[in-house]
Every structure is written in structure tokens, then in C-alpha cells.
Image (tube, coloured by chain):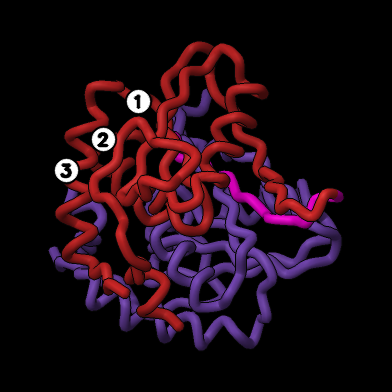
Chain colours: A red, B purple
Amino acid sequence: MQYYSYENFKNDTTTLIEQVQVFKPEAIVGIARGGLTLAHCMAEGLEIRDVQTIRTELYDGTTKREKISVFGNCSFKENIKVLVVDDIADSGETLKAVMCALAKSHPSVVFESCTLFYKKSSCYEPHFWIHEAKDWIDFFWERDYT
Amino acid sequence: MQYYSYENFKNDTTTLIEQVQVFKPEAIVGIARGGLTLAHCMAEGLEIRDVQTIRTELYDGTTKREKISVFGNCSFKENIKVLVVDDIADSGETLKAVMCALAKSHPSVVFESCTLFYKKSSCYEPHFWIHEAKDWIDFFWERDYT
């Protein structure tokens, strides 16, 4: 297990802000809860005021496989570019479900995604990511308040 | 001007988490952008998964006074308690407009508010706050990424 401090986060987020500028995002969607601090700090760095959130819940599907519900009513201007932000693509199921739900409900909007960490075994690879995750990441927001 | 570091934030947020427990919130609304990191960390500490966001824009009203528009479609279960989170009540206009808009669109929900800082000259006093703001606060999320 690796403690991921605010100092680590600050350095990586600064790098991620530089990387995503090629996409020229005009709005940000943070995936709650893990993506919220990252969404906030990236929005500050990118000078984007339009920050919205979405959250997911796991439930047991009828076939005993876990399924994901996506909650949150985002609204966007037509034809804009939106960056979807989460802390980690672990199994990748959350990001995959969110990207799919957003694309379906906002067909004129272009979505790209970014995370701090990406696991090679993830079923979804974000457009931008910083580190490959090899063990469990103990994010400061999960550790410092519990 | 006072630099408000992550360490300051961590200590104050821990105190705020303890204070708001008397209200027993079941969901959190963070006001973008300033309230997002606080909303995230409080949600972790309070073990609340339902975190939504709202944002405001200032515009010039016809009478030359500034007016505030509130954006964001929150949805809540009936009769729950929701904590509205922002970094600071400065003029207080943002929080006042948000609390008013939420109460109007969700009449069965109980809303209370909290901030890290409160200015005595604010037109709205949050239910919970930690410090009186006497000069400009330079929050780490505003400073560290620009």
C-alpha cells in the first residue's frame, strides 16, 4: 500500500493539467467521490468554471454480475469539449460506464477522460493518465479524514 | 493575504466534520469551484457517497446590480438532510442564492450549510463555520495550479 500525499498529488496534477491542454477542454465532469479534488484543482489550473459531477453505484445484476448505475444530470452547451476526471482507472468499469452514459445522453459533446492512475488490467484506458498503479493507492483524501 | 495550505485545510476540515455531525447529513452539495475539495474530503470523513455540485454565475442585472444565477440539477430522496459546502462566505451572495434556489426546488429536503471561513460582513451566515476571515484567503487550490 502506497500513501499518496497532497505533495504527490500536486506534482502529478500539475503534469496532468499540461497534458490535457492538447484537448482544450471547456468543461469538467468529476466522478464522485474519488475524482472531485482532482476535478477542482484541474479546473483551477485550466481556468474552467463549469465543473459538474456524476456518481455511480454498484448493484447486483440479475445474472449475479455487478452492474453500475450512473447518477447525475449534467447539462452542456452544444458541441463543447468536456474532460471527465477520476482518480484511478482500476477495474475501469466506473469510467467505462460513465463515458458510455455521457456519450449517449449528450451526442453533440466530445468527451475525453483523465486519471492520475491506470491499471494495465483496466477494461478502459483513459485518454490521459500519469502513473501505472501496481499496488493499492492510499489517496490522502481517503486516509486523512477517517 | 494569507496562504491557506493543505495542512491548514486538513486540520480545519477535521474540525468541521466533527461539528456538522450534529446535523446528521445524508448527502452533500459542493458549490463549484471553491467548495469542491472541501465537499470531497468531508464526504470521505462523513462516509457520504451522495455528493452533488452546483455552480453560480454573476451577471449584471437590469438595474446595474449584480445578480446570481444558479446552475446544476441536483436530485435527492424525499425528506433527507443535505449539507451545502463552500470554502468561504465572503459577500455571502453565492450561498444565499444557492440555499434559496435549493429550498425552492426541493421543498421536502432540509438544507444546512458550512464553510471554512466566514466574513462578519457577509449577508448570509452558514450554520457551521470555522474561522472569521479578516483578510484575503489564498486557498492552496487557487495558488498551487496557476
Q: In the rendered structure, which disc, 1 or 2, sits on the residue that comes first in sequence?
A: 1
Q: Quadrant of the image for the C terminus of chain A?
A: bottom left
Q: What is the x, y in percent for residue A114?
A: 36, 38
Q: Secondary structure at mark 2?
A: helix
Q: What is the x, y in percent for residue A137?
A: 34, 66
- Residue at coordinates 47% horizontally, 37% vertically from top-left? A124
| In magenta segment, residue B107 | no
Report the residue marked by disc 2: A46
Report the residue marked by disc 1: A25
Res A2 → quadrant: bottom left
What distance separates the C-alpha of mark 2 from that of mark 3?
12 Å
**Label 2 is found on which chain of the structure?**
A
Q: Secondary structure at mark 3?
A: helix
Question: In the visual, does B77 lie left or right of B137?
Answer: right
| Magenta segment boundaries in residue numbering | A50-62
Q: Amino acid at mark 1?
A: Pro
Q: Marks 1 and 2: same chain? A: yes
Q: Amino acid at mark 3?
A: Thr
Marks 3 & 1, CB-CB < 8 Å contact: no
Q: Quadrant of the image for the N terminus of chain A?
A: bottom left
